[in-house]
Image (cartoon, grey):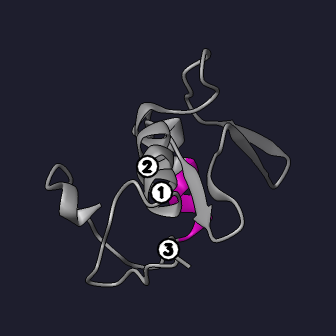
Amino acid sequence: MRELGEFEVTVRPFKVQELNKAINENRVYEAFGAGTAAIVSPVQSYLHEGTTYKIPIEEDTQAGKLTSRILGMMSDLQYCRTKRPDWQIDVCKL
């Protein structure tokens, strides 16, 4: 995300209560999980202590705009449409 130059990125632990508060204050625009197997998965809601917290999504894509964009970027890396030689090992030619 830092490399996009569009966002202030902070890496720190946080508690679910902080996320709950941000959702209640309409400060959450979208959420996603990322990992090797899932690539990028949008989060539409979660349940915490009996309360369902909804996260905004685009109805047509079932994801937020940034989530869709990150998924595209990750897919481009996986299918060798984009190269990142600073940390990517090129297995596309194997």
Q: Residues within 10 Å of mark 2 (few under 14, many from 20)?
A: some
Residue 18: in magenta span:
yes
Instruction: Return the residue at label 2.
Output: 70
At 53% from the left edge and 54% from the top edge, which residue is drawn?
19
Task: Check the image and report above or below for 52 versus 93.
Answer: above
Q: Residue 50: percent from the left, percent from the top?
A: 85, 47
Which of the two residues, 5 or 85, is positioned nearer the viewer here?
85
- Between the C-alphas of marks 1 and 2, the distance is 6 Å
Amino acid carrying label 3: it is: Lys
Amino acid carrying label 2: it is: Ile
Instruction: Return the residue at label 1.
Output: 74
Question: Does the residue at mark 1 contact the one at mark 2 (Cβ under 8 Å)?
Answer: yes
Q: How crowded is mark 3: few (under 14 residues within 10 Å), some or many (20 or more)?
A: few
Amino acid carrying label 1: it is: Met
- Between the C-alphas of marks 3 and 1, the distance is 18 Å
Instruction: Return the residue at label 3.
Output: 93
Count the marks. Answer: 3
Q: Residue 88: percent from the left, percent from the top?
A: 39, 80
Q: Residue 12: percent from the left, percent from the top?
A: 39, 78
Which of the two residues, 50 or 13, is positioned nearer the viewer here?
13
Residue 19: in magenta span:
yes
Which of the two residues, 25 or 7, is positioned nearer the viewer here?
7
Q: Is mark 2 on a helix, strand or loop?
A: helix
* Numbered range of the magenta stretch: 15-20
